[in-house]
């Protein structure tokens, strides 16, 4: 952590209001109606969930995102309650805040999403005010698919201001398939894909082979999320593995973003790579105990206890 910075971390990317409906006995056929057992409204989107997780773990955290002008009050109040500085959030003049409806049964789930104000995220990456705000943090976490021709320049600019940079693109197939994007990744301090994303980018099917492919491409640090198989990490040429943390999941919405928060938190505290990976696993797994990514994200005290037990 850098005490001369305004924030420890600033996260930039999509933000949504998540409406999570769960406990359906079966998926309805077209024209049928099904009734949920549970409903939760929660903050969603990779940048928002990771920012909230880091704030819960004691870091000075801000969010740089775009929301609707007329419907953002609840969202900003919720972020503030989670300890996130929401002053950098911009408001779209026309579009509403992004919305996702998550519908799940015991066997499957589906998402219905409207991007809304998130369509302006790309402009934040080149906006001077937004860049000044990013340079006010010791670590910048990008949870979006940045323009490939400007990403390397952005990362170099942030590095010159003393910022470390991590990226979780999420499932943006065109970006993941773009060779220019893959080449720009070597500028990053940390890349955080999941297994499916890494498969698409590398053409490999085994975790170690994926990480070796990233190493050949010049990446120094890649934290690979493997779902029920745990996670793997490339760190300065060395590969680490962490087994899945045992938990009975209720809802996996946002688990990958909670993994990101755990890894970044441990890294900011100068933990060794293996501990960073295990911290990420625990945060991602524990978040699945409740609906949405935040309700069951661990506190500092619970995380410390779980790490000792591990």
Image (spheres, rainbow, N blue to C red):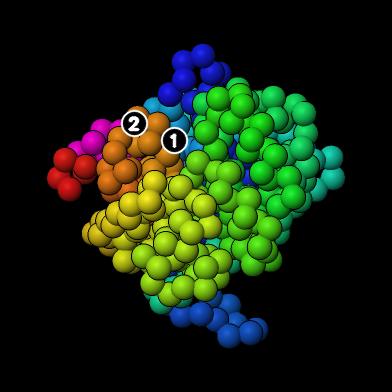
Q: Nearer the viewer, residue 300 or 187?
A: 187
Q: Residue 54 carries which label?
A: 1
From the viewer's perspective, tell me whether residue 267 is left or right of residue 112: left
Q: Give the mark nearest the N terminus, 1 or 2.
A: 1
The location of residue 196, given as percent across then percent down, is: 49, 69
**CA distance for labels 1 and 2:** 15 Å
The location of residue 209, given as percent across then percent down, is: 40, 68
The location of residue 10, given as percent across then percent down, is: 56, 32
Looking at the image, which residue is at 56% across and 49% down? 186
Considering the numbered disc 2 on the image, is that residue within a helix, a strand or a loop? loop
Answer few, some or many: residues within 10 Å of disc 2's Cα (few below 14, many 20 plus, some between 14 and 19).
few
Q: How many labels does the image show?
A: 2
Residue receiving disc 2? 270
From the viewer's perspective, tell me whether residue 289 is left or right of residue 25: left
Looking at the image, which residue is at 44% across and 65% down? 210
Secondary structure character of the magenta stretch overall: helix
Q: In which quarter of the image is residue 87?
A: top right
- For residue 303, say whether it is visible: yes
Residue segment shown in magenta: 297-305
The location of residue 112, given as percent across then percent down, is: 63, 66
- Check contact, mark 1 vs mark 2: CB within 8 A: no
Considering the numbered disc 1 on the image, is that residue within a helix, a strand or a loop? helix
Looking at the image, which residue is at 54% across and 38% down? 165
Q: Quadrant of residue 71?
A: top right
Instruction: Indicate yes or no whether the magenta region holds residue 138.
Output: no
From the viewer's perspective, tell me whether residue 85 is left or right of residue 73: left
- For residue 84, say whether it is visible: no
Vertical placement of 104 versus 7: above or below?
Answer: below
Vertical placement of 183 versus 162: above or below?
Answer: below
Looking at the image, which residue is at 63% across and 38% down? 155
């Amino acid at each position: 952590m850098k005490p001369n910075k305004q924030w420890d971390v600033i996260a930039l990317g999509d933000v949504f209001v998540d409406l999570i409906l769960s406990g359906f006995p079966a998926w309805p056929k077209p024209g049928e109606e099904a009734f949920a057992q549970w409903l939760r409204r929660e903050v969603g989107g990779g940048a928002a969930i990771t920012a909230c997780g880091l704030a819960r773990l004691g870091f000075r955290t801000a969010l740089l995102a775009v929301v609707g002008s007329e419907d953002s009050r609840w969202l900003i109040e919720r972020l503030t309650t989670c300890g996130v500085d929401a002053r950098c959030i911009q408001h779209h003049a026309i579009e509403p805040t992004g919305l996702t409806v998550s519908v799940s049964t015991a066997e499957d789930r589906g998402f219905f999403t409207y991007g809304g104000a998130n369509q302006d995220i790309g402009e934040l990456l080149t906006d001077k005010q937004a860049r000044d705000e990013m340079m006010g943090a010791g670590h910048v976490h990008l949870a979006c698919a940045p323009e490939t021709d400007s990403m390397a320049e952005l990362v170099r600019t942030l590095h010159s201001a003393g910022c470390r940079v991590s990226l979780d693109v999420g499932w943006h197939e065109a970006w993941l398939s773009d060779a220019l994007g893959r080449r720009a990744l070597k500028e990053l301090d940390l890349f955080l894909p999941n297994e499916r994303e890494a498969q698409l980018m590398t053409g490999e099917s085994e975790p170690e082979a994926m990480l070796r492919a990233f190493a050949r491409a010049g990446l120094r640090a890649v934290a690979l999320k493997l779902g029920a198989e745990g996670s793997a990490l490339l760190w300065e040429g060395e590969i680490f593995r962490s087994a899945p943390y045992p938990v009975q999941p209720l809802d996996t919405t946002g688990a990958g973003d909670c993994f990101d928060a755990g890894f970044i938190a441990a890294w900011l505290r100068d933990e060794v790579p293996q501990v960073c990976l295990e911290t990420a696993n625990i945060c991602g797994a524990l978040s699945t105990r409740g609906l949405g990514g935040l309700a069951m994200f661990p506190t500092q005290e619970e995380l410390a206890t779980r790490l000792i037990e591990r």
